Image (cartoon, rainbow, N blue to C red):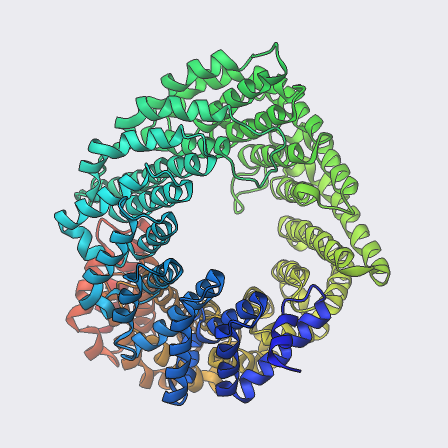
Amino acid sequence: MDASTLLSNTLSPDATTRKHATEQLETFANENFAGYIHTLIEQLSSEAAGMDVRNAAGLAIKNALSARDTSRQSIISHRWISLDLALRNSVKEQALRTLGSPVVRAGSVAAQVVSAIAVVELTNNEWPELIKILLQFVGDAENAGLRINTLQALGFICESVKPEILASQSNEILTTVVQGARKEEPSPEVQLAAINALYNSLEFVRDNFEREGERNYIMQVVCEATQNASTPVVVGAFECLVRIMQLYYDKMGFYMEQALFGLTVLGMRNSEEAVALQAVEFWSTVCDEEIELAIDAAEAAEFEEAPERESSNFAKIALPQILPVLLQLLTQQEEDAEDDEWNVSMAAGTALSLLAQTVGDDIVAAVIPFVEGNIKSHGSPESWHQREAAVMAFGSILDGPDPKVLAGLVAQALPTLIEMMQDPNVHVKDTAAWTLGRISDFLIDSIKTDVHLPPLVTALVFGLEDSTRIVGNCCWSLMNLAEQLGVQGEDDPLPATTPLSPFYDHVVSALMRVTEKYAHSNEANARSSAYEAISTFVTQSAADTLSTVSQVTLEVLSRMETLMTVQNQLVGSDDRNNWNDLQGNLCSVITAVVRKLGKEIRPLSDRIMTVLLSLCDTAGKQATVFEDALLAIGAITSALEQDFHPYISAFMPYLATALQAQEETQLCSIAVGLIGDICRALGPQSVQYCDEFMNALLKNLQSEFLNRSVKPPILSCFGDIALAIGPAFRPYVETTMQVLEQAGQMRVDPSSFELVEYVTLLREGIIEAYVGVVSALRETDQSVLLPYVPGIINFLQLAIEDEDRSEAVMRGGLGLLGDLCETFPRGEIREFLLREWITTALKLGRGKGMSAETRKVARWTKDAVKHATA
């Protein structure tokens, strides 16, 4: 089969044809990568090829050069750099030439290819002439398509390549991009491409933004673009302003005062919805930034420090100008809007909610007149717009202002809101249910259980019989009521009753009816919402409602068993997916029941395990129902403890399957957690399974395909195994300690937030593993541990002295240090404990910035160090 047909078949509507073509291409790439790339670039650059083929070829090249995972990207990059230089140069030349293709769409695909190659080559100090070539292309006034596609490529490159790599050329890139975005540019298509490129390069030009003159010029061009005759350019300009506010909030004071207040208010009033949406998003972004700054300021005040950055209070200053516009936009609802369809009234509601969190009490007096003036609007078919907007406005301001300021208003509004659950308009009812959920979540004290609760529950249960969109919000509101009025702490004694207990049978029965009604279609997530609410009611049940929990358990088990008998009758992927989703919903309820009843679930454990193991047997490793079944089994493991042992041999094959599914991150992660659950439950009895557990975990650690997020839990799991089997862990000590020492040496660039977070989690896992191993061998095999003490101490110094450490690392690290002191109390490790950094760490651990728990651990460790060095 020729390449053109093969590429075309990857886009076939027929799944079998598409799969076969994709597999053939993958085989070609693995067996002859050079030939694969050569074939693809020939198809992309061929003006005789169809656009679908050129598009498929370009995307295939891009995918062959790009990966989200860092380790995978390294392998891909090496494969490209290892190609013959002549071939690479030929590919680059053809990709650059295709930027100017008469078929503009082909040039756009080529822009993605050029940027993908650039990311690899520029990172490896290759292709130094690229930027100069691209800047020349942008200057070609005769070929608008070439200019557009080149600007697109430049934007992608600026977004993806580290700024320092292009630092010497950043000024030329910025100048070229900004010139294309100027109002003097005659082509709106070029302007749009330039605006989009500027958006992608805004983080790249951070140094330029620090210089006032250059910043002024950039802001002038972007602000002028918001007044462009071309709507797409205007939208792009507002998108730039949103991104600029995210990145450079601290630099925006002058521009807000001079231009942005007015421009964004005009933008919100723009008749083009795409423009209004971005202008509203600008103010949502301002609020996001100021909410974050308020949190930072509160934390700094707690430690009696000055915050690193201060809020400019843009939202509070602009409140009189922007609030009337947002309230007006709330009334622009669409009659037939879908739940997931983003429109200007939804955006305004979100912005209003964020505004309330930002300015607090100031918003109440400004919004209440609008609510009072519109909440009872009647008289025309369109009056529902005013009623729904009024309810939305009220619900949006419930989080932010002082609850004391809102309490009287909420108590006054509750009867009206409950009554509006019977409004003739579905939008009004839906928003009323949402607002009642917000009240239940944020202002539960305003709901008088003897006055408001009966009609409120009645209204919400009545809403469960309504349209699917209302069912979702009624379920959410009922969940909030259960969480706020139910059992408050898992470790607290089970209360005899709760304010919601008298309604349990009525509510749970109604929720179960919803799940039956939507058993064959989960329209608008109605069924899933109902099952989630049932799980919440199970979790929050008091002693006087356990009979309801028992009834739910038996009914759910019966449904699961019935579903198992009909799985062979499923026809097509839709039926199978619905079956999987439904079983997953039922698993979630069983998990909640098991966690609630604990050991009391024992009489039903055989029946539950039978159906869960059957689910594991029939579910593919890519089916989420497999994950749900494993979570339920994990709950049973913890509930039954050593009584889980009869099920372990039947369960082990499914656990092994999940552990081997390295490409399924969530599934593999759950399986790792289950090993810990099993070891904690079985204790020393788990030793017979530890060879299998350890081999699987070590294999996963070494895998290049496993998502790195699973690796910290794997390290922590070593500690769980060690704690469970105690001295029997000795055969695994050498390998475990080598793995932990190697993992502990990882360092990271502080500027990479994602990697800093990962290394923090990694270190927390390492500490938990060390704690488990030390505890396991403390009484019987101290001599085995002694050679590893220097490595542990060095790791702790690295982790604790890191300025980006988490408090969990500090607390866990000090606790581990104390464990070592108690393991070697007679001066065996005295020389390590007398190091200066330990004294400093103990002071930090007892400092006022730490929680009471951390300070307690630090004091205990200080005493332990004192005794071990005496």
Considering every residue shown, the one lying at the far top of the view is 379
Residue at (27% x, 56% y) in the render: 177
Estimate the x, y position of residue 270 in percent, counting from the top left.
41, 30
The quadrant of the picture occupied by the N terminus is bottom right
Q: Is residue 448 visible?
A: no
Residue 845 x/y as whole percent? 25, 57
Which is nearer the eye, 701 or 232? 232
Q: Residue 543 appears in which quarter of the rendering?
A: top right
- In terms of depth relative to the viewer, which is nearer, 256 or 527? 256
Instruction: Report the residue at 38% width, 77% height from top.
Output: 92
User: Which quadrant of the figure has residue 758?
Assistant: bottom left
Q: In this picture, is 309 found above or below 868?
A: above
- Classify residue 205 as left or right of residue 548: left
Number of numbered discs on residues: 0
Quadrant location of residue 456?
top right
Quadrant (top left/top right/bottom left/bottom right) for the C terminus: bottom left
Q: Residue at x 77, y 46 (%)?
A: 519
Decide if residue 219 is on the left or right side of residue 531: left
Nearest the camera: 729 or 28? 28
| Residue 102 visible to the viewer | yes
Q: How far across and down, in percent of the image, does residue 522 sit?
A: 71, 45
In front: 162, or 467? 162
Percent x, y of residue 603: 76, 56
Q: Is residue 866 left or right of residue 430?
A: left
